[in-house]
Image (cartoon, rainbow, N blue to C red):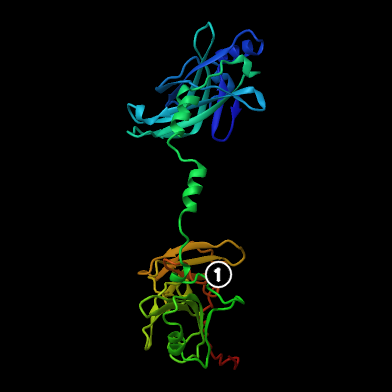
Amino acid sequence: MPTQTASLNFQFTAQGQSLATQALAGKIQIDFTKAVSSSTNHFGDTAAQAAQLTDLDNKQQTVTVTEVDAIDGDQSSVKIPVVFNKSDIDTDYQLLTIGLYAKPADGDEVLYAECALQDPVYMHKTSNSSTYSIDLFAIVGTSANVTLKVDPAGVVSHADLTAALKDYVTTAYVDGKISTIPKPDMSKYQTPILTAADGTAKLVIAAADDTDAKLKAIIGTKDTGKLLVDINAKNNPTGYSLIGEYFCDFDGLVTGYGIGPDGAMWNFTYNGTTTIWKLIPTAKTPGIPKLAVTYNATSKAFDYTLTAPEKDGLSDIIQYNLLWKDHSVDDWTTVIVKPDALTGQLTGVDITKTYDFKAAAQNAVGSSDFTDVITVWTGTVPGIPSLTVEYNAGKKRL
């Protein structure tokens, strides 16, 4: 039964169909003998074309079929694992078709089926154990019609297994050894509980508190936990309320960090006398750039000018994403603008339409928000007309 999927085409040859028919009738047993890789593309073969094949050309590798497995729950098919070892390759090639060969118990070997791949597999000679593997499934009516094989390389005897396991320790032995390990004195280690019993921060430095005094009170406790520092706490020079963690080490110091509402991180060290704060720069997305767009009636194009954002997010601007579209549709066209070329033209304009524009700046962290949408009409205001007035003396009128 041929199989056609998006990635492979498995077809029987006429000789393979003949063997399958005889096997289904119970007249023979099929012995799958070898698989061959070919660099010829047979993915487009029809059933009629595959039926005419008697052999594959451009053969690259041949492997012996050492394993044929019955499938649990489906005795009508067998699985044939095929493995091509890349260390056996003489010349690199592209694998496009696999030929499966078989024979009856007392007959000649024939090309039973072809399995063609839509996308080639590049087979590069290597010195390691790299392989390409595929399982071929063939319908044979019942697995009794096939000579089933087991690869002896994958079989372990009971004696071999017993000999190998004698060097491994038992669970009882490991449990016994673990029971003899003394329990550590946890008083010598920092307390792992980060919050107070009610789940709140263990150390709160309120608006009326002195940061130095609060940290001095816990120095040498070998403790660690969640920390809150109010913006108005004494000796908090950051200008923000902070949330973070503190750590009491064994050298008479309290260290830690706090993160403000803007995402900035501050490290601190209390040395027994004063608290030293240090801002740790953290890259963020950039600010919003400025965008100006005008219609150039002479060149029938839009002139644009981008202005870099005031803040680059502590990371260099990589590019600007300029988007524009016909005002009457939803789909935007994106134009990548380099940071060193912030002016340019957008061509291909329909002068009867109105267009929308927006832009964003992008750095290594990500993209900024877009500018407000700018809508520009391609029409122009007409110029001032000329007017000539003459006095008609005969008719005494202008």
The residue under label 1 is which amino acid type?
Answer: Asp
Please state if 370 lies on the left or on the right of 308 as rendered. Answer: right
- Which residue does the numbered mark 1 point to in the structure image? 356
Q: Which residue is at 49% across, 48% downward? A: 176
Res 143 quadrant in image: top right
User: In the image shown, does 88 or 327 lie closer to the viewer?
Assistant: 88
User: In the image shown, does 50 or 230 lie closer to the viewer?
Assistant: 230
User: In the image shown, does 142 or 337 lie closer to the viewer?
Assistant: 142
Please state if 71 lies on the left or on the right of 168 as rendered. Answer: right
Find residue 263 and report its horizontal and vertical position in percent: 48, 76
Find residue 219 and report its horizontal and vertical position in percent: 42, 82
Q: Determine whether 180 is above or below 261 in the image.
A: above
Q: Determine whether 305 is above or below 137 in the image.
A: below
**Residue lying farthest to the top in this orientation:** 106
Q: Determine whether 273 is above or below 310 in the image.
A: below
How packed mark 1 is, by other alpha carbons closer than 10 Å (few <14, some 14-19, many 20 or more), is some
**Residue 307, can we see it?**
yes
Q: Quick one: quadrant of the C terminus?
A: bottom right
Q: Quick one: quadrant of the N terminus?
A: top right
Give SS at disc 1: strand
User: In the image shown, does 56 or 320 lie closer to the viewer?
Assistant: 56
Please state if 25 lies on the left or on the right of 97 as rendered. Answer: right
Q: Which residue is at 54% across, 31% downward? A: 8
